[in-house]
Amino acid sequence: MAAEYTVVKRKFNDKDGNTQEKFYAMAHVNEIIKTKQVANSIQRSSSLNSADVYGVLCALSEVLATQLRQGNSVKLDGIGTFSLSLTSKPSTNSKNVPHKSVKVSRICFKAERNLSREIRDLSVAKAKTSL
């Protein structure tokens, strides 16, 4: 099976300040697979029932939030590592970074090498809804 992509137009300013347009490939999402669907898929390939799997997946979300709040990264073997990314106002001196400007900007995810390898060789095809 091939992953699909659409073509999108993006505008940007070049080094001279002129507005340019370029076209890029962007992953096309066929469907958003929700937690219950994941639980049902895991049930079919394990000895666990879907309710138990669903409960574990919901608990995982809570554990991730708790561990990230405590300043930890969370590594799930075979899947990847979740961590926080921070942002702040810049400073010319490391001691003068304004504390009040430091904020969590997002949750980062770095896939495990084996998971990335499995996906890397996936063939791609242009989606029918593309430009």
Image (cartoon, grey):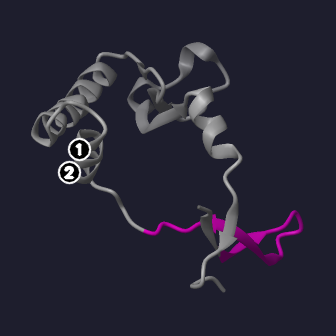
**Quarter assignment of residue 31:** bottom left
Q: Residue at x 77, y 69 (%)?
A: 13
Given residues 29 and 117, the one toward you in this image is 117
Q: Is the residue 2 above or below the residue 119 in the image?
A: below
Residue 36 image label: 2
Give the class, few, some or many, for how many residues have Cα within 10 Å of label 1's Cα (few <14, many ≥20).
many
The amino acid sitting under disc 2 is Lys
- Farthest residue toward the left? 51
User: SS of the residue at dot 2?
Assistant: helix
Work out which quarter of the rendered image holds the N terminus and state it. bottom right
The amino acid sitting under disc 1 is Ala
Secondary structure mainly formed by the magenta segment: strand
- Image mark count: 2
Residue 6 in the image, given as x and y percentages of width and height: 63, 74
For the residues labelled 1 and 2, say whether their Cβ atoms are less than 8 Å apart. Answer: yes
Residue 58 in the image, given as x and y percentages of width and height: 18, 37
Residue 10 image label: none
**Residue where numbered disc 1 is placed:** 39
Left or right: 108 in relation to 47: right
- The answer to whether residue 88 shows anywhere in this view is no
Residues at marks 1 and 2, CA–CA distance in whole angstroms: 5 Å
Left or right: 123 in relation to 88: right
Q: Is the residue 92 above or below the residue 127 in the image?
A: above
Left or right: 108 in relation to 57: right
Give the class, few, some or many, for how many residues have Cα within 10 Å of label 2's Cα (few <14, many ≥20).
some
User: SS of the residue at dot 1?
Assistant: helix
Q: Which residues are magenta?
A: 7-30
Q: Residue at x 55, y 68 (%)?
A: 28
Residue 2 in the image, given as x and y percentages of width and height: 62, 63
- The answer to whether residue 130 shows anywhere in this view is yes
